[in-house]
Image (tube, rainbow, N blue to C red):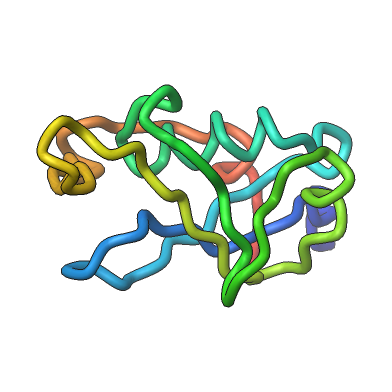
Amino acid sequence: MAEPQLDVKKPSVRIQSHKENDFIEVELDRQELSYQNLLKVSCCELGINPEQVEKIRKLPNTLLRKDKDIRRLQDFQEVELILMKDGSSELTEYTPSLLEKPCYNSNAAKMTY
């Protein structure tokens, strides 16, 4: 007998960068779909500080601003975090690897595929 699938939404997330264009899939509990939760989970998975994020964009060109926008996301929808510019007007380029900043998602560990 298979385990029941957890009720999660899985957007694909990346940091806006001219060097890196790979996405990672994050898992959001459908009961906790909010802008703040997407920001928190995405930043944890990508190893960045939420305070570095200026905006969240649903690709190709739609800014996400409210919880209602997040609830409308589809599984594997591509989302990009736009980082604040630093003093040199370049986007922050350093992103630690997942090995440098591990992030354990207990719900993901319980999922079956």
Give me the residue at 36% from left, 54% from top.
Answer: 15
Give me the residue at 24% from left, 31% from top.
Answer: 101
Q: In the image, residue 68 lies at what x, y percent?
A: 89, 45
Give me the residue at 81% from left, 32% from top.
Answer: 32
Q: In the image, residue 76 lies at what x, y percent?
A: 63, 71
Q: In the image, residue 83 lies at what x, y percent?
A: 36, 42
Tell me if 64 is positioned left or right of 49 in this view.
right
Tell me if 93 is positioned left or right of 41 in this view.
left
Count of residue discs: 0
Quadrant containing the C terminus in the rendered view: bottom right
Give me the residue at 84% from left, 62% from top.
Answer: 1
Vertical position of residue 11 compared to residue 38: above or below: below
Tell me if 105 is positioned left or right of 58 in this view.
left
Tell me if 68 is positioned left or right of 63 in this view.
right
Nearest the camera: 46 or 8? 46
Occupied quadrant, residue 60: bottom right
Nearest the camera: 58 or 100? 58
Occupied quadrant, residue 3: bottom right
Nearest the camera: 80 or 91? 91
Vertical position of residue 94 compared to residue 34: above or below: below
Vertical position of residue 5 compared to residue 110: above or below: below
Q: State the residue lying farthest toward the bottom.
A: 60
Q: In the image, residue 84 lies at what x, y percent?
A: 35, 37
